[in-house]
Image: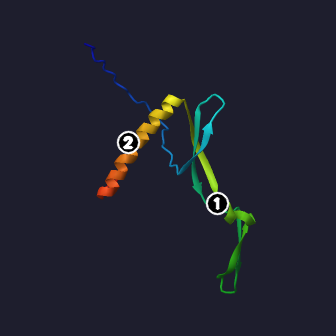
Amino acid sequence: MKEEVFINFKYKFPEDYNPFYSNGAYGGINPRGEIVMNFYFERNPIPYEEKRFINEKGEFIGEPELEPENHKTNVIRYVSTGVVMNLDSAKSLYDWLGKHIDTLEKEDQSGGDKS
C-alpha cells in the first residue's frame, strides 16, 4: 500500500502585483519548441491631434480633421505581458481552461450568476 503524500502550495505575490485585462493573444511556437503567448488589449487609437472649426457662436462645425489621417483604420494592440511555457505546462493550462470554460457554459445555460 502506497503512503499518501501531502503537498502544501503557498502563493507569493510581488507588492506591485496587478492583473492585466486581455482580450486577445498573439504568439506561437519558438525555436526551442516552447509556446509563446503575448497578451494584448485591443482598442481604437486616439488621434495625435484633432483640428476643429468653430462658428461665430463658439460651436463646433463640420467634421474634425484628425492626425494621422488613417487613424480610423488603425487598431492598437497594447501588449501588456507574455508567457512562455513548455508542452506539458501548455497541456495543463489547456485542461484548466477547458474545465473553467465548461463551468461557465453550464452556468450560462442554466441562467446562473457569473459574478
Distance from label 2 to label 1 (Cα)?
35 Å
Q: Is residue 94 left or right of residue 55?
A: left
SS under mark 2: helix
Amino acid found under the numbered disc labelled 2:
Lys
Viewer can see residue 23: yes
User: Residue 45's mark?
Assistant: 1
Q: Colour scheme used in the picture? A: rainbow
* Residue located at (38% from left, 42% from top): 99
Percent x, y of residue 26: 60, 45
Mark 2: few/some/many CA within 10 Å (<14, 14-19, 20+) = few
User: Residue 99's mark?
Assistant: 2
- Residue 10, quarter of picture: top left
Q: Earlier in the sequence, mark 2 or mark 1?
A: 1
**In the depicted view, which residue is nearer to us: 110 or 80?**
110
Quarter of the rendering occupied by the N terminus? top left
Camera-nearest label, 2 or 1: 2
Check the image and name the residue furthest to the left: 1
